[in-house]
Image (spheres, grey):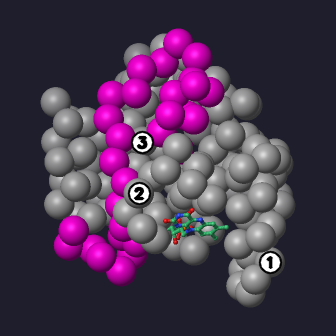
Amino acid sequence: MLCMKRTLILYYSFEGNSEWAATCLAEKLGEQADIERLIVRREPPKRGFFKFLIGGRSAIKGIDPGLNELTLNPADYQQIVLFFPIWAGTFAPAIGALLKKYPLEGKTVHLVASSASGSEGRAFDNIAAALNGSKIASSVCLRLPGSNRAEAEEKLSQLADALKA
Ligand SMILES: Cc1cc2nc3c(=O)[nH]c(=O)nc-3n(C[C@H](O)[C@H](O)[C@H](O)COP(=O)(O)O)c2cc1C
């Protein structure tokens, strides 16, 4: 019989912080988790004024950035851990696209946001509203984890312990 892993880590990262944090958690869980990056077809410019203007607007308006098919199927896992950046006080549009395409019904979901301020704004409430029939088991917001690694690692170790329990 095929033995499924319990935990799937899905992450979207525009500037590397969520990627660092997701990879850090994956290393802590080792064989117990799979990990996949969310790839979108449309992103804001990487720098300059329009990065924030276009990115922030797309998050507030919930504009669909066009999510590529995942190679792993979330339906095969019990626990889903979502890593994502905060844009304009809410989740980056890749997460909205994910929830639309893969509803995560019946899953236990853990949220890990990254932001410059350390605050998640309205992101967790907005995701809770978008999730249908799944339970948010934990949520944490990391302050620029790629640059504040010790602080982030402590929180990620606690999450790893909860996921293993
Ligand atoms: C378009 C855009 C909007 C942002 N809006 C916010 C915000 O409202 N609050 C905040 O604290 N940080 C904001 N940031 C900073 C990011 O949340 C932060 O740098 C995060 O760690 C980036 O994660 P990533 O490196 O995985 O993309 C914004 C960044 C971008 C690109």
Circles 1 and 2: CB atoms closer than 8 Å: no
Label 1: how many Cα within 10 Å (few below 14, some 14–19, many 20+)? few
The residue identified by callout 3 is 111
Kindly identify the residue that appears in the image at 16 percent across and 42 percent down: 161
Q: Is residue 148 left or right of residue 102?
A: left
Residue 119, numbered circle: 2
Total numbered labels:
3
Label 2: how many Cα within 10 Å (few below 14, some 14–19, many 20+)? some
**Magenta-drawn stretch contains 129:** yes
Q: What is the x, y in percent for residue 27?
A: 30, 59
Mark yes or no: residue 71 visible.
no
Kindly identify the residue that appears in the image at 49 percent across and 50 percent down: 121
The residue identified by callout 1 is 50
Q: Label 2 CB, ligand 1: below 8 Å?
A: yes
Residues drawn in magenta: 123-151
Q: What is the x, y in percent for residue 107?
A: 46, 21
